[in-house]
Structures are given as structure tokens and as C-alpha cells.
Image (cartoon, helix red, strand yellow):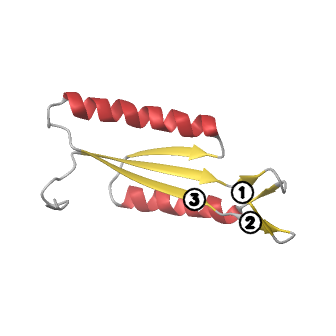
Amino acid sequence: QTISCLELPATHAIGFVITNSKYEKTNSKSEKAIENHQTFKEHLQDLGIEEVIEAEDSLENYKKGLNKILIRAVEAHVSAGKIKLLIYVYYAGHGIMYAGHTMT
């Protein structure tokens, strides 16, 4: 049985925007990934999502973002159904080619 979003409206929505724009093997940075990050963040805000967690170019930032989401998930769980949490996750990153090989 499928439940539609209309049957389960969120009372709190979070956007989690993850970006990988730095590529150490080639010492380069993807400006397109940075643009994608910003564009998607703006789309989330246009949808009325006020809490947007950002993790840019760092495993540490990614883990901090996941910890923030964990806190919201626990809050939703202990609310006994009063908080319905919806999480949008977007990854902005692009692999690159160098000398015929993919570098990520």
C-alpha cells in the first residue's frame, strides 16, 4: 500500500544540501557544483523550507549535518506523531576527467 504525501503532511521540513566541489587529485574545484548547491538551496527556500542544513567539501560538515538531522528525527519520534518530519537531500558534486581517467 502506498501513502501519498497528501495523506501524510509534514509539520517540519528540512533540506540537506551536500556539496563536493574540491578534487584533491587534480587540485581543482568545480564551480558548477557550487552553483548547483546555491540553486537548490534557493529552491528549497522558495518552497518555504526554512531549515536548510549545508555540508560543503568536508566529511566533518557532512557528519555535523547528519547529527542535526538526527536531533530532528528524535524530536519527531518522541512527539508521538505530532511532528511529521520530511527531509529533502540533495547532492551537488561532479566527477571530473583527467588524462582519460575519472577523478572523484
Occupied quadrant, residue 84 = top left
Front position in the image: 90 or 49 = 90
Examine the rendered structure and indicate whether residue 101 appears above or below residue 85.
below
What amino acid does circle 3 point to? Ala
Image depth: mark 1 or mark 3 in front: 1
Q: Residue at x 74, y 65 (%)?
A: 96
**To which residue does mark 3 refer?**
92
Answer whether labels 3 and 2 touch (C-beta < 8 Å): no
Answer whether labels 1 and 2 touch (C-beta < 8 Å): yes
Q: CA distance from mark 1 to mark 3?
A: 13 Å
Q: Residue at x 21, y 45 (%)?
A: 11
Image depth: mark 3 or mark 2 in front: 2
Residue 61 position in % (x across, y down): 58, 37
The residue furthest bottom is 100
Which secondary structure lies at badge 2?
A: strand
Q: Residue at x 56, y 44 (%)?
A: 55
**To which residue does mark 2 refer?**
96
- Earlier along the polypeptide chain: callout 1 or callout 2? 2
Q: CA distance from mark 3 to mark 2?
A: 13 Å
Which secondary structure lies at badge 1?
A: loop
The image quadrant where one finds the C terminus is: bottom right
What amino acid does circle 2 point to? Ile
Q: CA distance from mark 1 to mark 2?
A: 7 Å
Q: Which mark is residue 104?
A: 1
The image quadrant where one finds the N terminus is: bottom left
